[in-house]
Image (spheres, grey):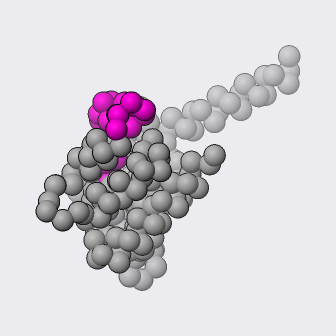
């Protein structure tokens, strides 16, 4: 069973239904909330993999993890959670949420940029980089950009946008040198 393929199929169905109901933006936010909660809460993982819980309870937990508020009429996420649980796919819900986020970005023409540096960069540098990236993506495409500081990079930076990754960190350069040194010394022995 290929979880990625199954998750993408469910995510496509959710996106299609959400677009039909004009709720794709709300479902996007709910999927992001679910992903954050799944990463933080170990109990959520336990609930999704517990075969003893009834389907109704699991669907309710999924909706709560998405931040969905109970209302008089069933929301898109409540209907989707019921569908997922009825097909015993609750354990792949995190993969479905990630796939939905990815499909949503494609639908809305959003690129995700991420800069990791060893030391904090100034707001001015961050704005210049964001502006430069925005000028390089296709017209009408939006760029969401965030930065992160990781001192273990030692220096330099790692820049990633969608599937493109540029690693100019000292840590990776040292790792390459170490690997070359080890490979060269193996031939000598």
User: Secondary structure of the magenta portion, mostly?
Assistant: helix
Query: Count of labels shown?
Result: 0
Residue 123's spot in the image, x, y percent? 23, 57
Residue 69 or 117: which is nearer the viewer? 69
Q: Is residue 116 magenta?
A: no
Residue 54's spot in the image, x, y percent? 34, 38
Q: Is residue 44 visible?
A: yes
Residue 98 or 1: which is nearer the viewer? 1
Q: Quadrant of residue 142?
A: bottom left
Does residue 77 appear to the left or right of 141 in the view shown?
Answer: left
Q: Which residue occupies 86% across, 21% down?
A: 188
Q: Is residue 11 above or below residue 136?
A: above
Q: Which residue occupies 40% across, 68% down?
A: 15
Does residue 137 appear to the left or right of 127 in the view shown?
Answer: right
Q: Which residue occupies 45% across, 66% down?
A: 13
Does residue 114 appear to the left or right of 188 in the view shown?
Answer: left
Q: Quadrant of residue 83?
A: bottom left
Q: Is residue 50 magenta?
A: yes
Residue at the extreme bottom of the image, as rendered: 139
Q: Which residue occupies 86% across, 16% down?
A: 189
Residue 186's spot in the image, x, y percent? 81, 22
In the rendered structure, which segment of residues is drawn in magenta?
32-54
Does residue 19 appear to the left or right of 63 in the view shown?
Answer: right
Residue 85's spot in the image, x, y percent? 40, 48
Residue at the extreme left of the image, as rendered: 72
Q: Is residue 98 visible?
A: no
């Amino acid at each position: 069973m290929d979880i990625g393929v199954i998750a993408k199929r469910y995510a496509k169905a959710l996106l299609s239904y959400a677009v039909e109901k004009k709720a794709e933006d709300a479902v996007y936010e709910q999927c992001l909330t679910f992903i954050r909660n799944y990463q933080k809460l170990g109990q959520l993982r336990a609930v999704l993999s517990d075969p003893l819980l009834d389907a109704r309870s699991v669907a309710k937990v999924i909706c709560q993890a998405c931040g969905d508020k109970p209302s008089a009429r069933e929301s898109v996420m409540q209907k989707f959670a019921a569908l997922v649980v009825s097909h015993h796919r609750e354990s792949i819900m995190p993969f479905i949420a990630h796939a939905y986020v990815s499909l949503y970005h494609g639908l809305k023409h959003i690129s995700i940029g991420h800069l990791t540096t060893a030391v904090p960069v100034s707001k001015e540098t961050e704005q210049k980089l964001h502006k430069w990236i925005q000028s390089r993506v296709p017209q009408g495409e939006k760029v969401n950009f965030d930065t992160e500081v990781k001192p273990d990079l030692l220096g330099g930076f790692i820049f990633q946008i969608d599937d493109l990754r540029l690693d100019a960190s000292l840590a990776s350069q040292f790792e390459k040198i170490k690997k070359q040194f080890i490979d060269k010394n193996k031939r000598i022995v």
